[in-house]
Image: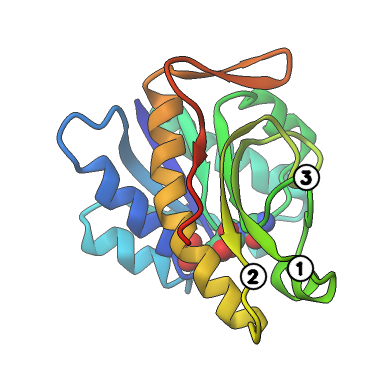
Amino acid sequence: MKVGVLISGRGSNLRSLIAATREPGFPAEIVIVISNKPDAPGLEVARAAGIPTQVVNHKDYPTREAFDAELDAALRRAGIELICSAGFMRILSDGFVESWRDRQLNIHPSLLPAFKGLRVHERVLEAGCRITGCTVHFVRAAMDEGPIVAQVAVPVLEGDTPDMLADRVLEAEHKLYPLALKLVASGRARVVNERVEISGGSGAMQAPL
Ligand code: GAR
């Protein structure tokens, strides 16, 4: 399955996806990496791995729809069958999301549906949660919503700062996204009535305690 990865920044999840997809027998291949930011460090991660990159800078487009149309065209030109958003920090229009329905994944650094949006780790700590985690889900029009493919729980430890927690969750993300992509690309995870059905196992991972 041909995958396009969307990024806006560092690209550490991209790096983990590249490594996983290069394992023998992995059912997906990353054929393009697109960033909405020209200076995203993740672009260099892709280049170093020999993967074609493209910048679709949102600042070059007068409207969200115009930006989305160019993004869509770039993905279709590359023959993409599945989009993986990995730290892609743009809200996509309903039309774009609908045309890639059940063909776009996103990773979010919380146990959705809790803590959608930004400043996730600060808010987890403010709320006094003892457990947090990360989620890979199919994208829907509402931000950080959509059928859940896989999640992993991560403990909140005494004395955690938002950065410490973010680092621990990120380690879990790097294991989770390749697992979720494998489930979807192999056809084991499918959306049925807005829930993901997984054949032959589950999308849960053990918390790395
Ligand atoms: C990751 O923690 C990802 O879950 C988060 O941005 C970070 C990107 O890191 N995404 C969101 O918050 C989306 N709502 P990376 O660029 O190193 O992969």
**Residue that numbered label 3 is attached to:** 113
Along the horizontal axis of the image, is 72 left or right of 93?
left
Q: CA distance from mark 1 to mark 2?
A: 9 Å
Closer to the camera, 61 or 41?
Answer: 41
With respect to residue 189, does 115 lie above or below?
Answer: below
Residue 115: image quadrant is bottom right
Question: Within 8 Å of ligand 1, the CB of disc 3?
Answer: no
Determine whether the residue tagged by mark 1 lies in a helix, strand or loop.
Answer: helix
Three-letter amino acid code at disc 1? Val
Local crowd size for mark 2, using a 10 Å CA cut-off: few (<14), some (14–19), many (≥20): many
Local crowd size for mark 1, using a 10 Å CA cut-off: few (<14), some (14–19), many (≥20): some
Three-letter amino acid code at disc 2? Val
What x and y, as percent, mark residue 104?
A: 57, 33
| First along the sequence among labels 1 and 3 | 3
Q: Is residue 8 visible?
A: no
Residue drawn at x 65%, y 24% is 101
Determine whether the residue tagged by mark 3 lies in a helix, strand or loop.
Answer: loop
The quarter of the picture where the N terminus appears is top left
Three-letter amino acid code at disc 3? Pro
| First along the sequence among labels 1 and 2 | 1
Residue drawn at x 84%, y 69% is 127
Along the horizontal axis of the image, is 191 left or right of 189?
right
Local crowd size for mark 3, using a 10 Å CA cut-off: few (<14), some (14–19), many (≥20): few
Q: CA distance from mark 3 to mark 2?
A: 18 Å
Q: Quadrant of ligand 1?
A: bottom right
**Residue that numbered label 1 is attached to:** 124
Residue drawn at x 75%, y 49% is 64
Q: Are marks 1 and 3 in contact (CB under 8 Å)?
A: no
With respect to residue 121, does 181 lie above or below?
Answer: above
Closer to the camera, 110 or 89?
Answer: 110
Q: Are marks 1 and 2 in contact (CB under 8 Å)?
A: yes
What x and y, as percent, mark residue 176?
A: 46, 47
